[in-house]
Image (cartoon, coloured by chain):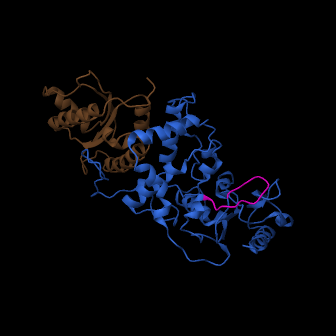
């Protein structure tokens, strides 16, 4: 990963100097001198700011939605590259207006203020995709993939084994802590509706009162709106100031979508998403059946 | 409904073209079924946003029934197929969050199936009543 920054800078310099893009979204060293933060570089002479190391947690694809109609280059890890595919599939991006600088990623570390993190992020420990599925420029040598689906869904299975009462108690305890700051929504590359259901006043789906039932409704619908779409960057959970395990809900749906529809979001930008298509012969648990 | 007088609240989303007419058929045929169901008529089972199910539960429903046209009979050709996929995922998600899967039901009821409608509602109401009131609901 040592020469990544150099290569990213070279690509960025070339793109900006040639006028192919008017902004490069990448990472720079943040104000604590150690951890990375997102950087927006508009001039070729500023590319020296760009860097990459194992503190680059952010999913920068989120920022592309503010740059509609303007050619932009973005630095993506493999999980973030899946978000590019998602947005292309859903016609939120035009392929010719985005230049993808894809990185081969060995894993990102937990953040800690002012110091290097020790442990790998949870998502990186069970990552099954180290090479970006879409890129214009590849940085790094592709590495062998080691799929680990059992580990990936272990936390989901652990909770699913419990009784409904225990699961309800678990989620209620989480929902009581939620302050509905919507950071999970703001950081999500898949949450791009101009008017979120949570902000609607008529009908008012979600009251302004911040309590467990309303928060539960928010968590449920947020997760459902990402069913078959969540690319597993886990940014929602990382930015949650209350430490609510939001991505557990996303993993649950991801597993179900993979089982039932053999679909993994963000692998390419062509396969129709599972909730926008159907198979006339299927029975997913109608007539009161519960096995689906 | 039950020995201790518990009356479950059930929300039923019925499609305008088949199931609502099926409920009508049950009524005009004088069929008897438990009256705990609150029927909401929707243009198509595909109109049932999973948000409706979540909202019903948030507002204190004990069970949610969805009914639409049989596969192949949808007035809009394919609404019920989409509905089925969404329903399957939503039930999985809500079950994971602690709502028993027995509190959901999706069934196909045509306009002529008054008898089936009364059976579905009877079975479902009994199943929900057996589970008892939901915990953690604002009342």
For the view shown, which residue lies furthest in the top direction? B5
Q: Using the image, determine if residue A171 lies above or below residue A254.
A: above
For the view shown, which residue lies furthest in the right direction? A45
For chain B, the rendered hue is brown
User: Which residue is at 49% across, 40% downward?
Assistant: A171
Q: Observer-nearest residue: A153 or A16?
A: A153
User: Which residue is at 40% across, 38% downward?
Assistant: A165
User: Which residue is at 35% across, 31% downward?
Assistant: B62
Magenta part, dominant SS: loop
x, y percent for residue A242: 63, 41
Q: Using the image, determine if residue A123 lies above or below residue A10.
A: above
x, y percent for residue B42: 34, 35
In the rendered structure, does residue A117 fall within the stretch colored magenta? Answer: yes
Q: Observer-nearest residue: A51 or B96?
A: B96
Residue B21: quarter of image: top left
**Can I make out residue A23 in this image?**
no
What residue span does the magenta drawing correspond to?
Answer: A110-121
For chain A, the rendered hue is blue
Q: Is residue A133 left or right of residue B42?
A: right
Q: Quadrant of the C terminus of chain B?
A: top left
**Can I make out residue A192 in this image?**
yes
Q: Quadrant of the N terminus of chain B?
A: top left
Residue A103: quarter of image: bottom right
Q: Using the image, determine if residue B119 lies above or below residue A142.
A: above
x, y percent for residue A37: 75, 56
In the rendered structure, does residue A172 fall within the stretch colored magenta? Answer: no
x, y percent for residue A108: 66, 63
């Amino acid at each position: 990963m040592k020469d990544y920054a150099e290569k990213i800078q070279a690509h960025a310099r070339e793109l900006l100097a040639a006028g192919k893009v008017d902004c490069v979204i990448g990472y720079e060293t943040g104000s604590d001198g150690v951890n990375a933060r997102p950087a927006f570089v508009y001039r070729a002479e500023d590319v020296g700011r760009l860097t990459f190391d194992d503190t680059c947690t952010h999913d920068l694809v989120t920022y592309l939605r503010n740059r509609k109609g303007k050619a932009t280059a973005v630095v993506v890890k493999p999980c973030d590259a899946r978000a590019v595919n998602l947005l292309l599939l859903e016609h939120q991006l035009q392929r010719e207006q985005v230049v993808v600088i894809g990185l081969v990623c060995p894993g990102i570390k937990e953040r800690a203020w002012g110091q290097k993190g020790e442990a790998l992020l949870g998502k990186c420990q069970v990552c099954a995709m180290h090479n970006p599925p879409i890129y214009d420029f590849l940085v790094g040598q592709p590495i062998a993939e080691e799929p680990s689906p059992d580990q990936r869904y272990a936390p989901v299975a652990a909770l699913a084994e419990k009784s409904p009462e225990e699961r309800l108690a678990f989620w209620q305890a989480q929902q009581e802590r939620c302050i509905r700051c919507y950071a999970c929504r703001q950081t999500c590359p898949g949450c791009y509706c101009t008017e979120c259901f949570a902000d609607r006043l008529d009908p008012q789906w979600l009251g302004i009162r911040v309590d467990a039932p309303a928060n539960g409704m928010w968590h449920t619908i947020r997760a459902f709106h990402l069913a078959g779409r969540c690319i597993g960057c886990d940014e929602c959970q990382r930015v949650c100031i209350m430490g609510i395990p939001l991505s557990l809900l996303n993993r649950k749906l991801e597993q179900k979508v993979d089982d039932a529809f053999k679909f993994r979001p963000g692998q390419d930008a062509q396969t129709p998403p599972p909730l926008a298509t159907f198979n006339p012969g299927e029975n997913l648990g109608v007539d009161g059946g519960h096995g689906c | 409904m039950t020995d201790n007088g518990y009356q479950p609240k059930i929300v039923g989303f019925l499609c305008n073209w088949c199931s609502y007419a099926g409920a009508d058929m049950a009524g005009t045929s004088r069929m008897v079924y438990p009256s705990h169901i609150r029927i909401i008529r929707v243009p198509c089972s595909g109109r049932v946003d999973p948000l409706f199910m979540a909202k019903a539960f948030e507002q204190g429903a004990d069970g949610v029934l969805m009914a639409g046209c049989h596969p192949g009979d949808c007035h809009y050709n394919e609404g019920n197929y989409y509905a089925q996929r969404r329903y399957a995922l939503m039930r999985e998600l809500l079950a994971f969050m602690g709502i028993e899967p027995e509190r959901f039901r999706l069934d196909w009821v045509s306009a002529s199936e008054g008898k089936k409608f009364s059976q579905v509602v009877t079975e479902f109401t009994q199943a929900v009543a057996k589970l008892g009131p939901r915990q953690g609901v604002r009342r």
